[in-house]
Amino acid sequence: MTAFAVETRALTKKFGDFTAVNDVTLQIEQGSVYGFLGPNGSGKSTTIRMLCGLLAPTSGEGLVLGMRLPQDGQKLKRRIGYMSQKFSLYQTLSVVENLNLYAGLYEIRGRDRKARIQEMLELAGLQDRRRELAGELSGGLRQRLALGCSILHRPEILFLDEPTSGVDPKARLHFWDIIYNLAADGTTVMVTTHFMDEAEHCDQVAFISFGQLIADDSPENLKSSIPGRLYEVDGGKGMEMVKALRGNAKQVLDAYPFGEKLHVLVPPEVTLSDEGIFSGARLTEIAPTMEDVFVFLVKEQADRNAAIVSGVGEDE
Ligand SMILES: Nc1ncnc2c1ncn2[C@@H]1O[C@H](COP(=O)(O)OP(=O)(O)OP(=O)(O)O)[C@@H](O)[C@H]1O
Ligand SMILES: [Mg+2]
């Protein structure tokens, strides 16, 4: 029995000539919350669909709960939960009818069915709305109902594909409370998100870009892997500063807008001061956030790819 809930080796998916998932090797510890981040179209959903046994890999290997992909896909389905990017709810059915439908799909019957549905209504905070149509619920409630439907059969691992997109911050927090409780009870959770604050709270975070895994570590380790010093620049001449900074590769590793402010990454020996192009701005040295990690990794990969295209840097 493997200690990992998920293990892949060189997992690859091609659609025709296009490689959507490229040589992905990863491991997910049992009972952990694993965040899966990446820009639009980077291969997150495709990876998850392979791990759920919905899509056969073109090459490479995958083990989920010790079962092989795609051969054991059928057996696997009973032991995993999957909430797809477009929640699969029946809009014209009520809350309880949706849960009943999923209970039927998982062949949960009799007293057990009643108890599990009640449990899900409580978990999702939908007890008083059991008769309302799924299509008439708010985004946050619909999301919790979709989650309830996907864990009715008590899966050992749960795959959540952008479960919180389009949901307000309060509903997101409520949703994450449920996720933590599931993980505390031993469920492994793999979750894709575009929200960096959510990534911050995962045990492990992987970044995928152009189908390739470019980082996979704990949030603390990822943050400490950024080289140099990071400054926050408040005020000053905005984009003019970015242009000037980007032209100064020796002093500046990267400069990018961050909300209303500007983040500037410099080599460890460089100290920025509020003179010259920074006049009128306030400079503060700060600790990187997961968003800075994301910006850094994507840039690093772009630089690497550019170097390969121009034929330099490969053997360094
Ligand atoms: N069935 C398919 N046939 C052809 N191309 C596909 C298919 N499914 C996905 N792709 C392509 O593979 C790439 C990866 O798609 P995927 O849906 O995995 O990305 P994603 O990271 O989940 O993006 P998003 O953040 O937008 O959900 C995209 O370029 C997409 O167009
Ligand atoms: Mg997706």
Image (cartoon, rainbow, N blue to C red):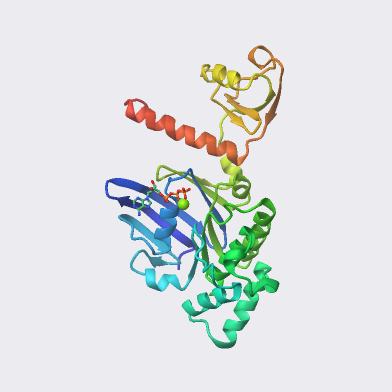
How far from the left and from the top, in percent, is residue 243? 54, 19
- Vertical comparison of 72 with 228: above or below: below
**Residue 314 in view:** no
- Horizontal side, residue 201 vs residue 20: left or right: right
- Vertical comparison of 148 with 160: above or below: below
How far from the left and from the top, in percent, is residue 149? 55, 70
> Of residues 240 and 55, which is closer to you in this image?
240
- Horizontal side, residue 45 vs residue 271: left or right: left
- Vertical comparison of 73 with 275: above or below: below
Q: Quadrant of the N terminus?
A: bottom left
How far from the left and from the top, in percent, is residue 304? 41, 31
How far from the left and from the top, in percent, is residue 233? 67, 25
- Horizontal side, residue 22 vs residue 133: left or right: left
- Vertical comparison of 299 with 145: above or below: above
Residue pushed farthest bottom? 110
Q: Quadrant of the C terminus?
A: top left
Residue found at x 61% / y 58% = 139
Residue pushed farthest left? 17
**Residue 172 in view:** yes
Residue pushed farthest top? 276
Would you identify the image quadrant in which residue 68 lies? bottom left
- Horizontal side, residue 251 vs residue 208: left or right: right
| Figure disc tally | 0
Residue found at x 62% / y 73% = 120
Residue found at x 59% / y 87% = 111
